Amino acid sequence: MEKFLVKGGNTLSGEINIGGAKNAAVAILPATVMARGRCVIENVPDISDVRVLLDILSQLGAKIEMLSNDTVAIDTTDINSNEVPYELAKMIRASYYFIGALLGRCSEAHVSMPGGCNLGVRPIDQHLKGFQALGAEVTVDGGIIHAKADRMLGSHIHFDVVSVGATINVMMAAVRAHGITIMENVAKEPHIVDLANFLNSMGADIRGAGTDVIKIHGVDMLRPSTYSIIPDQIEAGTYMVMAAATGSSLLIKNVIPKHLEAITDKLISSGAEVEEFDDSIRVTGGKVIKKINVKAMPHPGFPTDMQPQITAMLCRAEGTSIITEGVWEGGRFRYTDELKRMGANISVDGKMAVVEGVSKLTGAPVRAADLRAGAAMIIAALTAEGTTEIEDIHYIERGYENIVAKLTAVGADIQKIIVPDGDSMRQAQ
Ligand code: EPZ
Protein backbone atom coordinates (compact mmCIF):
# COMPACT_ATOMS: atom_id res chain seq x y z
CA MET A 1 0.00 0.00 0.00
CA GLU A 2 1.27 3.52 -0.82
CA LYS A 3 1.12 6.29 1.76
CA PHE A 4 2.33 9.83 2.25
CA LEU A 5 4.51 10.38 5.32
CA VAL A 6 4.48 14.03 6.42
CA LYS A 7 6.55 15.51 9.22
CA GLY A 8 4.94 18.77 10.33
CA GLY A 9 6.40 22.06 11.50
CA ASN A 10 8.53 23.18 8.55
CA THR A 11 8.09 26.70 7.25
CA LEU A 12 7.84 26.65 3.46
CA SER A 13 9.46 29.05 1.03
CA GLY A 14 9.99 29.38 -2.70
CA GLU A 15 7.89 28.95 -5.83
CA ILE A 16 5.25 26.47 -6.97
CA ASN A 17 4.22 26.06 -10.61
CA ILE A 18 0.55 25.27 -11.20
CA GLY A 19 -0.48 22.74 -13.85
CA GLY A 20 -3.46 22.65 -16.21
CA ALA A 21 -6.94 22.58 -14.67
CA LYS A 22 -8.11 19.02 -13.93
CA ASN A 23 -11.81 19.87 -14.26
CA ALA A 24 -11.21 21.58 -17.61
CA ALA A 25 -8.95 18.78 -18.91
CA VAL A 26 -11.49 16.06 -18.07
CA ALA A 27 -14.02 17.85 -20.29
CA ILE A 28 -11.73 18.99 -23.11
CA LEU A 29 -10.11 15.60 -23.71
CA PRO A 30 -13.46 13.82 -24.35
CA ALA A 31 -14.57 16.79 -26.47
CA THR A 32 -11.79 16.05 -28.98
CA VAL A 33 -13.93 13.18 -30.37
CA MET A 34 -16.34 15.82 -31.74
CA ALA A 35 -13.94 16.69 -34.56
CA ARG A 36 -12.48 14.15 -36.97
CA GLY A 37 -8.77 14.86 -37.08
CA ARG A 38 -5.74 15.65 -34.92
CA CYS A 39 -6.16 17.96 -31.93
CA VAL A 40 -3.14 19.15 -29.93
CA ILE A 41 -3.95 19.92 -26.29
CA GLU A 42 -1.35 21.83 -24.25
CA ASN A 43 -0.94 22.35 -20.48
CA VAL A 44 -2.51 18.98 -19.72
CA PRO A 45 -2.00 18.10 -16.02
CA ASP A 46 0.00 14.96 -15.23
CA ILE A 47 -2.69 13.25 -13.14
CA SER A 48 -4.31 9.81 -13.12
CA ASP A 49 -7.71 11.12 -14.28
CA VAL A 50 -6.08 12.32 -17.50
CA ARG A 51 -4.37 8.96 -18.02
CA VAL A 52 -7.72 7.16 -17.67
CA LEU A 53 -9.35 9.47 -20.22
CA LEU A 54 -6.50 8.95 -22.71
CA ASP A 55 -6.99 5.19 -22.23
CA ILE A 56 -10.70 5.55 -23.02
CA LEU A 57 -9.92 7.64 -26.13
CA SER A 58 -7.46 5.00 -27.26
CA GLN A 59 -10.02 2.23 -26.69
CA LEU A 60 -12.50 4.18 -28.84
CA GLY A 61 -9.91 4.10 -31.66
CA ALA A 62 -8.14 7.46 -31.28
CA LYS A 63 -4.39 7.70 -31.80
CA ILE A 64 -2.66 9.27 -28.78
CA GLU A 65 0.82 10.82 -28.98
CA MET A 66 2.49 12.55 -26.01
CA LEU A 67 4.42 15.45 -27.62
CA SER A 68 5.86 16.54 -24.25
CA ASN A 69 5.06 15.93 -20.58
CA ASP A 70 2.08 18.29 -20.77
CA THR A 71 1.13 18.29 -24.46
CA VAL A 72 -0.82 15.51 -26.16
CA ALA A 73 -1.89 14.97 -29.78
CA ILE A 74 -5.20 13.13 -30.17
CA ASP A 75 -6.15 11.93 -33.65
CA THR A 76 -9.83 10.94 -33.62
CA THR A 77 -10.13 10.27 -37.37
CA ASP A 78 -10.45 6.50 -37.01
CA ILE A 79 -12.65 6.35 -33.89
CA ASN A 80 -14.80 3.30 -34.56
CA SER A 81 -16.75 2.83 -31.34
CA ASN A 82 -19.37 4.72 -29.35
CA GLU A 83 -19.11 2.58 -26.22
CA VAL A 84 -17.21 3.33 -23.00
CA PRO A 85 -16.79 0.13 -20.99
CA TYR A 86 -17.41 -0.25 -17.25
CA GLU A 87 -13.80 -1.15 -16.43
CA LEU A 88 -12.63 2.34 -17.42
CA ALA A 89 -15.79 4.40 -16.88
CA LYS A 90 -16.02 3.33 -13.22
CA MET A 91 -12.62 4.85 -12.44
CA ILE A 92 -13.56 8.49 -12.82
CA ARG A 93 -16.56 10.79 -12.74
CA ALA A 94 -15.75 12.49 -16.01
CA SER A 95 -16.23 9.35 -18.13
CA TYR A 96 -19.84 10.49 -18.57
CA TYR A 97 -18.64 13.43 -20.67
CA PHE A 98 -18.25 10.93 -23.51
CA ILE A 99 -22.06 10.86 -23.74
CA GLY A 100 -22.29 14.51 -24.78
CA ALA A 101 -19.14 14.24 -26.88
CA LEU A 102 -20.22 11.09 -28.76
CA LEU A 103 -23.73 12.48 -29.29
CA GLY A 104 -21.95 15.43 -30.84
CA ARG A 105 -19.84 13.15 -33.05
CA CYS A 106 -22.17 10.38 -34.13
CA SER A 107 -25.50 10.95 -32.37
CA GLU A 108 -25.11 7.79 -30.32
CA ALA A 109 -23.37 6.86 -27.06
CA HIS A 110 -23.34 3.88 -24.69
CA VAL A 111 -21.44 4.80 -21.53
CA SER A 112 -21.30 2.97 -18.23
CA MET A 113 -22.44 4.90 -15.14
CA PRO A 114 -19.47 6.94 -13.87
CA GLY A 115 -17.30 6.49 -10.79
CA GLY A 116 -15.60 9.34 -8.95
CA CYS A 117 -15.17 10.66 -5.43
CA ASN A 118 -17.77 9.67 -2.86
CA LEU A 119 -19.41 13.01 -2.09
CA GLY A 120 -22.77 11.57 -1.22
CA VAL A 121 -25.57 11.14 -3.75
CA ARG A 122 -24.40 12.21 -7.21
CA PRO A 123 -27.45 12.03 -9.52
CA ILE A 124 -27.22 12.70 -13.25
CA ASP A 125 -30.87 13.59 -13.87
CA GLN A 126 -29.96 17.05 -15.19
CA HIS A 127 -27.61 15.57 -17.77
CA LEU A 128 -30.36 13.25 -19.02
CA LYS A 129 -32.92 16.09 -18.95
CA GLY A 130 -30.68 18.14 -21.23
CA PHE A 131 -30.01 15.31 -23.70
CA GLN A 132 -33.74 14.51 -23.90
CA ALA A 133 -34.59 18.19 -24.44
CA LEU A 134 -32.29 18.09 -27.49
CA GLY A 135 -34.21 15.12 -28.88
CA ALA A 136 -32.04 12.24 -27.75
CA GLU A 137 -33.66 9.04 -26.55
CA VAL A 138 -31.99 8.18 -23.23
CA THR A 139 -32.33 4.93 -21.30
CA VAL A 140 -30.32 3.45 -18.43
CA ASP A 141 -30.08 -0.31 -18.54
CA GLY A 142 -27.79 -2.54 -16.47
CA GLY A 143 -25.62 0.38 -15.40
CA ILE A 144 -25.14 1.59 -18.97
CA ILE A 145 -26.46 4.96 -20.15
CA HIS A 146 -27.75 4.64 -23.74
CA ALA A 147 -28.27 7.88 -25.67
CA LYS A 148 -29.32 8.04 -29.32
CA ALA A 149 -30.66 10.84 -31.46
CA ASP A 150 -31.73 10.59 -35.11
CA ARG A 151 -31.58 14.38 -35.29
CA MET A 152 -30.84 16.70 -32.35
CA LEU A 153 -32.79 19.95 -32.36
CA GLY A 154 -31.94 23.13 -30.43
CA SER A 155 -34.02 23.64 -27.30
CA HIS A 156 -34.60 26.00 -24.36
CA ILE A 157 -33.22 24.17 -21.31
CA HIS A 158 -33.61 25.46 -17.74
CA PHE A 159 -31.62 23.33 -15.30
CA ASP A 160 -33.28 22.59 -11.95
CA VAL A 161 -29.94 22.81 -10.15
CA VAL A 162 -26.65 24.45 -11.07
CA SER A 163 -24.52 21.52 -12.24
CA VAL A 164 -20.98 21.73 -13.64
CA GLY A 165 -21.26 18.27 -15.18
CA ALA A 166 -24.67 18.77 -16.75
CA THR A 167 -23.68 22.18 -18.14
CA ILE A 168 -20.59 20.64 -19.75
CA ASN A 169 -22.28 17.50 -21.05
CA VAL A 170 -25.32 19.23 -22.55
CA MET A 171 -23.20 22.03 -24.02
CA MET A 172 -21.20 19.47 -26.00
CA ALA A 173 -24.31 17.79 -27.38
CA ALA A 174 -26.01 21.13 -28.18
CA VAL A 175 -23.06 22.26 -30.30
CA ARG A 176 -24.22 19.77 -32.97
CA ALA A 177 -27.99 20.21 -32.51
CA HIS A 178 -29.80 21.92 -35.40
CA GLY A 179 -30.87 25.46 -34.54
CA ILE A 180 -30.46 27.47 -31.34
CA THR A 181 -30.12 26.12 -27.80
CA ILE A 182 -30.56 28.35 -24.77
CA MET A 183 -29.27 26.93 -21.48
CA GLU A 184 -30.29 28.67 -18.25
CA ASN A 185 -29.34 28.23 -14.58
CA VAL A 186 -25.96 26.93 -15.75
CA ALA A 187 -22.66 26.54 -13.92
CA LYS A 188 -20.17 29.41 -14.41
CA GLU A 189 -16.88 27.87 -13.25
CA PRO A 190 -13.68 28.74 -15.16
CA HIS A 191 -13.60 25.22 -16.60
CA ILE A 192 -17.03 25.77 -18.22
CA VAL A 193 -15.61 28.82 -20.02
CA ASP A 194 -12.47 26.87 -20.96
CA LEU A 195 -14.48 24.09 -22.61
CA ALA A 196 -16.63 26.62 -24.48
CA ASN A 197 -13.47 28.36 -25.73
CA PHE A 198 -12.05 25.01 -26.88
CA LEU A 199 -15.27 24.07 -28.71
CA ASN A 200 -15.39 27.52 -30.33
CA SER A 201 -11.77 27.05 -31.45
CA MET A 202 -13.06 23.96 -33.28
CA GLY A 203 -15.77 25.99 -35.02
CA ALA A 204 -18.63 25.84 -32.53
CA ASP A 205 -20.76 28.95 -31.86
CA ILE A 206 -21.21 29.23 -28.07
CA ARG A 207 -21.89 32.56 -26.37
CA GLY A 208 -22.37 33.45 -22.71
CA ALA A 209 -20.26 30.73 -21.06
CA GLY A 210 -19.42 31.99 -17.57
CA THR A 211 -22.75 33.82 -17.28
CA ASP A 212 -26.20 32.56 -16.20
CA VAL A 213 -27.33 31.97 -19.79
CA ILE A 214 -25.45 30.11 -22.54
CA LYS A 215 -26.64 30.46 -26.16
CA ILE A 216 -25.48 27.93 -28.76
CA HIS A 217 -26.01 28.03 -32.52
CA GLY A 218 -25.67 24.43 -33.75
CA VAL A 219 -23.08 23.78 -36.47
CA ASP A 220 -22.79 20.94 -39.00
CA MET A 221 -19.22 20.00 -38.20
CA LEU A 222 -16.22 20.83 -36.06
CA ARG A 223 -12.57 20.85 -37.10
CA PRO A 224 -9.63 19.80 -34.93
CA SER A 225 -7.65 22.56 -33.18
CA THR A 226 -4.70 23.28 -30.92
CA TYR A 227 -5.67 24.51 -27.47
CA SER A 228 -4.01 25.26 -24.13
CA ILE A 229 -5.88 24.41 -20.93
CA ILE A 230 -6.25 27.12 -18.25
CA PRO A 231 -4.28 26.81 -14.98
CA ASP A 232 -5.92 24.83 -12.19
CA GLN A 233 -7.86 27.16 -9.86
CA ILE A 234 -8.18 24.51 -7.15
CA GLU A 235 -4.57 23.31 -7.25
CA ALA A 236 -3.50 26.97 -6.93
CA GLY A 237 -5.98 27.57 -4.11
CA THR A 238 -4.73 24.50 -2.28
CA TYR A 239 -1.13 25.77 -2.25
CA MET A 240 -2.35 29.26 -1.26
CA VAL A 241 -4.02 27.74 1.80
CA MET A 242 -0.88 25.70 2.56
CA ALA A 243 1.15 28.94 2.70
CA ALA A 244 -1.38 30.62 5.00
CA ALA A 245 -1.79 27.55 7.22
CA THR A 246 1.96 27.07 7.75
CA GLY A 247 2.79 30.77 8.20
CA SER A 248 4.94 30.61 5.07
CA SER A 249 5.45 32.82 2.02
CA LEU A 250 5.00 31.08 -1.35
CA LEU A 251 4.97 32.47 -4.89
CA ILE A 252 2.42 30.44 -6.84
CA LYS A 253 3.09 30.70 -10.56
CA ASN A 254 1.09 30.11 -13.77
CA VAL A 255 -2.28 31.15 -12.32
CA ILE A 256 -5.15 33.44 -13.35
CA PRO A 257 -5.61 35.67 -10.25
CA LYS A 258 -9.19 36.52 -11.21
CA HIS A 259 -10.13 32.80 -10.83
CA LEU A 260 -8.78 32.90 -7.27
CA GLU A 261 -10.63 35.99 -5.98
CA ALA A 262 -13.00 34.14 -3.61
CA ILE A 263 -10.06 32.24 -2.09
CA THR A 264 -7.90 35.37 -1.86
CA ASP A 265 -10.73 37.20 -0.10
CA LYS A 266 -11.06 34.53 2.61
CA LEU A 267 -7.31 34.20 3.15
CA ILE A 268 -6.97 37.97 3.65
CA SER A 269 -9.87 37.90 6.13
CA SER A 270 -8.06 35.12 8.02
CA GLY A 271 -4.95 37.29 8.38
CA ALA A 272 -2.79 36.27 5.42
CA GLU A 273 -1.23 38.69 2.95
CA VAL A 274 -1.92 38.16 -0.77
CA GLU A 275 -0.06 39.93 -3.58
CA GLU A 276 -1.39 39.51 -7.14
CA PHE A 277 0.77 39.70 -10.28
CA ASP A 278 -0.16 39.08 -13.95
CA ASP A 279 0.14 35.27 -13.83
CA SER A 280 1.29 34.57 -10.29
CA ILE A 281 0.21 35.23 -6.73
CA ARG A 282 2.21 35.45 -3.50
CA VAL A 283 0.60 34.33 -0.25
CA THR A 284 2.25 35.10 3.09
CA GLY A 285 0.76 33.58 6.22
CA GLY A 286 0.00 35.88 9.12
CA LYS A 287 1.34 35.50 12.65
CA VAL A 288 -2.02 34.05 13.68
CA ILE A 289 -4.93 32.56 11.75
CA LYS A 290 -8.09 34.54 12.43
CA LYS A 291 -11.46 32.81 12.57
CA ILE A 292 -13.69 33.29 9.51
CA ASN A 293 -16.98 31.96 8.21
CA VAL A 294 -17.01 30.26 4.80
CA LYS A 295 -19.96 29.22 2.61
CA ALA A 296 -19.06 26.99 -0.32
CA MET A 297 -21.18 27.95 -3.33
CA PRO A 298 -21.16 27.61 -7.12
CA HIS A 299 -18.78 30.00 -8.92
CA PRO A 300 -18.16 32.90 -8.31
CA GLY A 301 -18.75 31.85 -4.70
CA PHE A 302 -16.09 30.13 -2.60
CA PRO A 303 -15.36 26.82 -4.40
CA THR A 304 -16.72 23.68 -2.77
CA ASP A 305 -13.50 21.97 -3.90
CA MET A 306 -11.63 24.28 -1.51
CA GLN A 307 -13.91 23.60 1.47
CA PRO A 308 -11.85 20.76 3.06
CA GLN A 309 -8.59 22.64 2.61
CA ILE A 310 -9.69 25.87 4.30
CA THR A 311 -11.31 23.88 7.11
CA ALA A 312 -7.96 22.17 7.75
CA MET A 313 -6.35 25.59 8.08
CA LEU A 314 -9.08 26.88 10.41
CA CYS A 315 -8.50 24.00 12.86
CA ARG A 316 -5.75 26.18 14.31
CA ALA A 317 -7.50 29.55 14.04
CA GLU A 318 -8.03 31.84 17.01
CA GLY A 319 -11.71 31.39 17.80
CA THR A 320 -14.63 29.57 16.17
CA SER A 321 -15.19 29.38 12.42
CA ILE A 322 -18.33 28.17 10.65
CA ILE A 323 -18.12 26.31 7.34
CA THR A 324 -21.29 25.78 5.31
CA GLU A 325 -21.46 23.47 2.26
CA GLY A 326 -23.80 24.96 -0.31
CA VAL A 327 -23.20 22.58 -3.23
CA TRP A 328 -23.09 18.95 -2.05
CA GLU A 329 -26.17 17.56 -0.28
CA GLY A 330 -24.23 15.32 2.07
CA GLY A 331 -22.03 18.21 3.12
CA ARG A 332 -18.77 16.44 2.08
CA PHE A 333 -17.59 16.67 5.72
CA ARG A 334 -16.50 13.03 6.15
CA TYR A 335 -12.88 14.20 6.28
CA THR A 336 -13.51 16.05 9.57
CA ASP A 337 -13.41 12.70 11.41
CA GLU A 338 -9.83 12.34 10.18
CA LEU A 339 -8.95 15.86 11.34
CA LYS A 340 -10.37 15.03 14.78
CA ARG A 341 -7.88 12.15 14.99
CA MET A 342 -5.20 14.85 14.82
CA GLY A 343 -6.79 16.82 17.66
CA ALA A 344 -9.11 19.13 15.74
CA ASN A 345 -12.28 20.29 17.49
CA ILE A 346 -15.03 20.17 14.87
CA SER A 347 -18.74 19.47 15.19
CA VAL A 348 -20.74 18.75 12.04
CA ASP A 349 -24.48 19.14 11.66
CA GLY A 350 -25.68 18.35 8.13
CA LYS A 351 -24.24 20.96 5.80
CA MET A 352 -22.55 22.99 8.54
CA ALA A 353 -19.27 22.43 10.41
CA VAL A 354 -18.33 24.43 13.52
CA VAL A 355 -14.56 24.56 13.92
CA GLU A 356 -13.23 25.55 17.37
CA GLY A 357 -9.61 26.56 16.86
CA VAL A 358 -7.05 24.58 18.89
CA SER A 359 -3.47 25.56 19.66
CA LYS A 360 -1.97 22.55 17.91
CA LEU A 361 -2.65 19.44 15.86
CA THR A 362 -0.73 16.22 16.40
CA GLY A 363 0.43 13.83 13.69
CA ALA A 364 -1.64 10.62 13.37
CA PRO A 365 -2.50 7.90 10.84
CA VAL A 366 -5.32 9.29 8.65
CA ARG A 367 -6.85 8.53 5.27
CA ALA A 368 -7.92 10.56 2.26
CA ALA A 369 -11.70 10.27 2.08
CA ASP A 370 -11.68 11.86 -1.39
CA LEU A 371 -9.48 14.02 -3.58
CA ARG A 372 -9.83 17.35 -1.79
CA ALA A 373 -10.13 15.70 1.63
CA GLY A 374 -6.71 14.20 0.90
CA ALA A 375 -5.31 17.67 0.21
CA ALA A 376 -6.80 18.80 3.53
CA MET A 377 -4.96 15.97 5.30
CA ILE A 378 -1.67 17.19 3.83
CA ILE A 379 -2.39 20.75 5.00
CA ALA A 380 -3.20 19.55 8.51
CA ALA A 381 -0.12 17.31 8.54
CA LEU A 382 2.17 20.16 7.46
CA THR A 383 0.97 22.20 10.46
CA ALA A 384 0.90 19.34 12.99
CA GLU A 385 3.49 18.38 15.58
CA GLY A 386 5.03 15.04 14.70
CA THR A 387 4.49 12.73 11.77
CA THR A 388 1.28 11.95 9.90
CA GLU A 389 0.70 8.92 7.69
CA ILE A 390 -1.89 9.42 4.97
CA GLU A 391 -3.54 6.39 3.35
CA ASP A 392 -5.62 6.14 0.15
CA ILE A 393 -3.35 8.63 -1.56
CA HIS A 394 -4.58 7.49 -4.98
CA TYR A 395 -7.41 9.99 -4.47
CA ILE A 396 -4.88 12.80 -4.08
CA GLU A 397 -2.92 11.69 -7.13
CA ARG A 398 -6.12 11.92 -9.20
CA GLY A 399 -5.98 15.69 -9.04
CA TYR A 400 -2.57 16.95 -7.85
CA GLU A 401 0.34 16.42 -10.24
CA ASN A 402 3.74 15.74 -8.63
CA ILE A 403 2.54 17.00 -5.24
CA VAL A 404 5.45 15.40 -3.30
CA ALA A 405 8.04 16.99 -5.63
CA LYS A 406 6.31 20.38 -5.59
CA LEU A 407 6.09 20.43 -1.77
CA THR A 408 9.58 19.04 -1.20
CA ALA A 409 10.99 21.80 -3.41
CA VAL A 410 9.60 24.44 -1.04
CA GLY A 411 10.85 22.75 2.12
CA ALA A 412 8.06 20.41 3.18
CA ASP A 413 9.07 17.13 4.79
CA ILE A 414 6.83 14.77 2.77
CA GLN A 415 7.59 11.46 1.16
CA LYS A 416 5.71 8.68 -0.58
CA ILE A 417 6.29 5.30 1.03
CA ILE A 418 5.26 1.79 0.14
CA VAL A 419 4.04 -0.27 3.06
CA PRO A 420 3.74 -3.89 1.91
CA ASP A 421 1.33 -5.93 3.99
CA GLY A 422 3.08 -6.82 7.20
CA ASP A 423 6.55 -5.60 6.15
CA SER A 424 8.38 -2.62 7.55
CA MET A 425 8.01 0.69 5.75
CA ARG A 426 10.53 1.38 3.02
CA GLN A 427 11.13 4.48 0.90
CA ALA A 428 9.27 4.53 -2.46
CA GLN A 429 11.64 3.89 -5.39
C1 EPZ B 1 -17.87 18.80 -10.63
O1 EPZ B 1 -18.58 17.66 -10.20
C2 EPZ B 1 -16.44 18.61 -10.17
N1 EPZ B 1 -15.90 17.41 -10.81
C3 EPZ B 1 -16.39 18.48 -8.65
O2 EPZ B 1 -15.02 18.49 -8.29
C4 EPZ B 1 -17.03 19.71 -8.02
O3 EPZ B 1 -17.11 19.50 -6.61
C5 EPZ B 1 -18.42 19.96 -8.58
O4 EPZ B 1 -18.37 20.00 -10.02
C6 EPZ B 1 -19.00 21.29 -8.11
O5 EPZ B 1 -18.15 22.32 -8.49
C7 EPZ B 1 -15.47 17.53 -12.09
O6 EPZ B 1 -15.53 18.58 -12.70
C8 EPZ B 1 -14.90 16.28 -12.70
P1 EPZ B 1 -22.24 19.11 -10.09
P2 EPZ B 1 -20.08 17.40 -10.76
O7 EPZ B 1 -22.97 18.41 -11.17
O8 EPZ B 1 -20.19 17.94 -12.12
C9 EPZ B 1 -26.35 18.03 -8.00
C10 EPZ B 1 -13.01 17.70 -7.53
O9 EPZ B 1 -12.65 17.71 -6.35
N2 EPZ B 1 -26.69 17.41 -9.28
O10 EPZ B 1 -21.89 20.55 -10.26
O11 EPZ B 1 -20.41 15.98 -10.51
C11 EPZ B 1 -25.23 17.30 -7.28
O12 EPZ B 1 -25.74 16.22 -6.51
C12 EPZ B 1 -14.41 17.27 -7.85
O13 EPZ B 1 -12.32 18.09 -8.51
C13 EPZ B 1 -27.98 16.95 -9.47
O14 EPZ B 1 -28.83 17.03 -8.58
O15 EPZ B 1 -20.91 18.31 -9.75
C14 EPZ B 1 -24.62 18.38 -6.41
O16 EPZ B 1 -25.39 18.52 -5.23
C15 EPZ B 1 -15.11 16.67 -6.65
N3 EPZ B 1 -28.31 16.38 -10.67
C16 EPZ B 1 -24.79 19.63 -7.26
O17 EPZ B 1 -25.80 19.33 -8.23
C17 EPZ B 1 -27.41 16.27 -11.70
O18 EPZ B 1 -27.77 15.76 -12.78
C18 EPZ B 1 -23.54 20.05 -8.00
O19 EPZ B 1 -23.06 18.92 -8.73
C19 EPZ B 1 -26.10 16.75 -11.48
C20 EPZ B 1 -25.78 17.33 -10.26
Image (cartoon, rainbow, N blue to C red):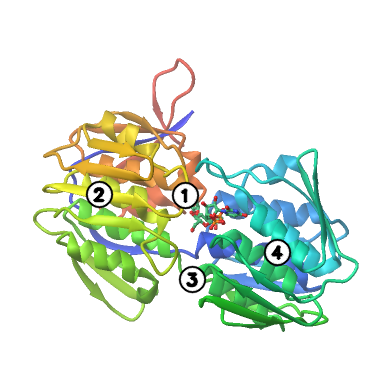
Any atom of ligand 1 within 8 Å of the CB at mark 1?
yes
Q: Which label's residue is closer to the chain start, 3 or 2?
A: 3
Q: CA distance from mark 1 to mark 4?
A: 21 Å
Q: Residues within 10 Å of mark 1 (few under 14, many from 20)?
A: some
Say which of 29 and 196 sits in front. 196
Q: Position of residue 37 (x, y in %)?
A: 79, 74
> Which label lies toward us, 1 or 3?
1
At 80% from the left and 38% from the top, the residue drawn is 142
At 40% from the left and 50% from the top, the residue drawn is 403
Image quarter for ligand 1 equals bottom right
Q: CA distance from mark 2 to mark 4?
A: 36 Å
In the figure, is residue 20 to the left or right of 18?
right
Say which of 288 and 299 sits in front. 299
Q: Which amino acid does the dot numbered 3 rest on?
A: Pro
Q: Which label's residue is closer to the chain start, 2 or 1?
A: 2
Q: Residues within 10 Å of mark 3 (few under 14, many from 20)?
A: many
Q: CA distance from mark 1 to mark 3?
A: 19 Å
Q: Position of residue 116 (x, y in %)?
A: 58, 45
Q: Which mark is residue 85?
A: none
Q: Which label's residue is closer to the chain start, 1 or 4?
A: 4
Q: CA distance from mark 2 to mark 1?
A: 16 Å
Q: Which mark is residue 328?
A: 1
Q: Position of residue 236 (x, y in %)?
A: 37, 62
Any atom of ligand 1 within 8 Å of the CB at mark 4?
no
Q: Which residue lies under the disc numbered 2?
A: 322
Q: Which amino acid does the dot numbered 4 rest on?
A: Gly
Q: Which residue lies under the disc numbered 4?
A: 130
Q: Which residue lies under the disc numbered 3?
A: 190
Q: Is residue 328 above or below residue 68?
A: above
Please tell me whether mark 3 sits on a helix, a strand or a loop: helix
